[in-house]
Image (cartoon, rainbow, N blue to C red):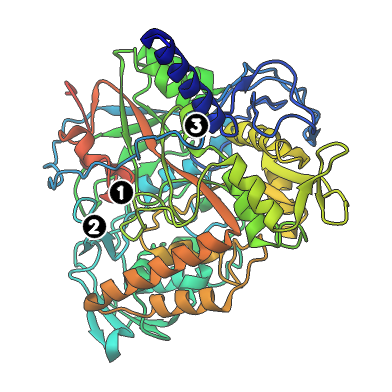
Amino acid sequence: MSRQIRLLICFQLFVLALLAACSDQQTPTLMGPAPTAAASPTASPVITSTNSASSTITRPTGTATTTQASTSAVVNTAVPTPRPTVTLPATTSSQVFPTPSITPLPIVPLQPVRRTGGTLTVGVLDGDFKARNFSPYAADLSEVSQRLQTLTWNAGLLYRDPVKLEWKPLAARALPVAENEGRKLTFQLRQDIFWSDGSPILASDYIYAFNSALKETRYPHLAELRRIRSVEGPDTRTLVFTFDDRYATAFDTIRLIEPLPEKVWGRYPFNNPERNPEISRPTVVSGPYLPDPTALIYQGQLNYFMGRPNFDKVSLILAGSPADLLTGLKAGSLGWTFFGLSPASINDLQVFSSVTIYRWTPQDAGQRYIGYNLSNPFLRNPAVRQALNRTVDVRSLIATVEKGQAVEQTSFLPAASEFAIKVAPTGRFSLRQAQEDLKNSGYYPRDLDDALSDSAGKVVPALELIYPDNIPESASIAVYLQQQYMQLGLKVKTTRLDQANYLKRRAEGKYDLEVGLLRVPGASDPDNFKAQFTSQGSLNFSGYSSDTVDALFSQALRLSDVEQKSQRRLLYEQLQRLIANDSPVFFLYTLQSSTVMGSSIDPGGGGVINLPRWQLAWDAFPALLNWYQRGAA
């Protein structure tokens, strides 16, 4: 046999072996109609959707685009708008992807204040502005309300340095004196803190706010405030906090208390927007800006204890749609916007010289997840949930749905958390392994039609997946899951709900699966994220309950000494692994934050250095002290 023939035969054998090894892994993209339940279990179908975007945003989100193709149940009566098809690239579970990393930021102090004056114009959607709320203790603050409150309130006792993440005094003269093993903390107020009308901010204003917040049954941080046994004011400049136990998060809890002028707010029902005009436009404030009667113009107030902010005025410009906001940014008529622009919109803005785009991954970043309702008999088995997790190609979702603006997540903590474990404790994307896991759990594709069935041949009932209509990325993910699960022989009905009905259905447990977005503003400690997993957690919609998990969260919360941080780290590592193995919630990835500013705006002279670490300099260090406008008079 000639040498050429031998080489040809060897090459053919090599190709055949390679094809055999890859045949059960490959997930080619299918064009055209969605596959039926009998489709090949290795196909990765096109993502399509019947849903249209909503301009009502209550959390920082983006928008993804999809086309009409499925027969999902639609609750919203509006006519859906067709979307371009979003197609995931072909992937195999054996492919090697680079692991996303977070580049450490240089330790650079906040830049010196540069007061150049001028006006900052901020674009706001008209609907979001009408729903504004200036009460720091409201049930569910939209991003617009949170941003506006940073303009008007800023007399918390302490804050966290956005660079070193260390606690520092703000309205307090110094960090507190601790007694009774940390259960009692005493603060002395500064002598130079005043309300905008020139009257002093007193200890009684903090006590009034605290007592009023305790009556707000829907306040999301109520459980944390209830850890405080009492707040007393021995004199007008002293506050004494007594906790019912030692807590590692005592400072986080105290930071929640934003004083309100009792002499003004005390005249009205505290939480009734119709009878308390201060909720829609405060007349006496502690922060750097005082709103005019329209609440559209915010003028720097002279009695602010940290001095005049860099901008003389902040002017809100109302827009009817996200497209109008984009037009304003491109034209240079807007310096910033409160609206969470979609990843696609941000990418489109990169070519315009009128704007500068900043990106970072904050510790309290939004997290996209899949929630399982454990009252469903099929989903009650952790091995089944792990099998469903394995059908999701997370990195392809990041690339397509999020346009690369997200970081793969390994546990229930955001990727940038200092406590987050760096390696995923459970397996990732593999359709073949998902099928094996289901077989080991007693579920097989039926010979008749490949429908997923139990050992007696009974087909697993179709699952209902709910998602909110105001987060278009959720629609894309929902359709993707529907098509991926179909490859296992599992049918899914997707249901698009308006925000109110989505929250209601989720709270009542009337769903099987949900595609959600978790964001806990200002969260810096792992304890802030336990609400989804503790037995009595306010966000525990899955019905998950574990005595071990409850005990570990309770134990880690009470280790408050500095030397015990390493012990807390070990406890939270254990919690992350336990919860990942049980998987009542499957976290997909951590969203990166992006902000688009007009090119005339400089965030403190340090550019991007002042933006990461802790939301924006706007949030971390009193509002707009470090932002200024180049060339302003």
Relative vertical location of residue 49 with respect to residue 285 in this rendering, above or below: above
Where, quadrant-wise, is the N terminus in this rendering? top left
Q: Which residue is mark 1?
A: 614
Q: Is residue 262 visible?
A: no
Q: Is disc 1 placed on a helix, strand or loop?
A: loop
The answer to whether mark 2 and mark 1 are in CB contact below 8 A is: yes
**Residue shown at 15%/45% (left/top)?**
110
Where, quadrant-wise, is the C terminus in this rendering? top left
* Quadrant in the rendering for residue 590: top left
Q: How many marks?
A: 3
**Residue shown at 26%/80% (left/top)?**
186
**Residue shown at 51%/28% (left/top)?**
17
- Given residues 350 and 156, the one toward you in this image is 350
Given the image, on which type of amino acid does mark 3 rest?
Answer: Ser
Horizontal and vertical percent position of residue 625: 22, 42
Residue projecting furthest to the bottom: 180
Q: Which residue is mark 2?
A: 165
* Quadrant in the rendering for residue 286: bottom left
**Residue shown at 29%/77% (left/top)?**
236
| Residue 396 tag number | 3
- Given residues 217 and 444, the one toward you in this image is 444
- Of the image marks 3 and 2, the number of the one nearer the N terminus: 2
Relative vertical location of residue 602 with respect to residue 191 in this rendering, above or below: above
- Of the image marks 2 and 1, the number of the one nearer the N terminus: 2
10 Å crowding of disc 2: few (<14), some (14-19), many (20+): few
Q: Nearer the viewer, mark 3 or mark 1?
A: 3
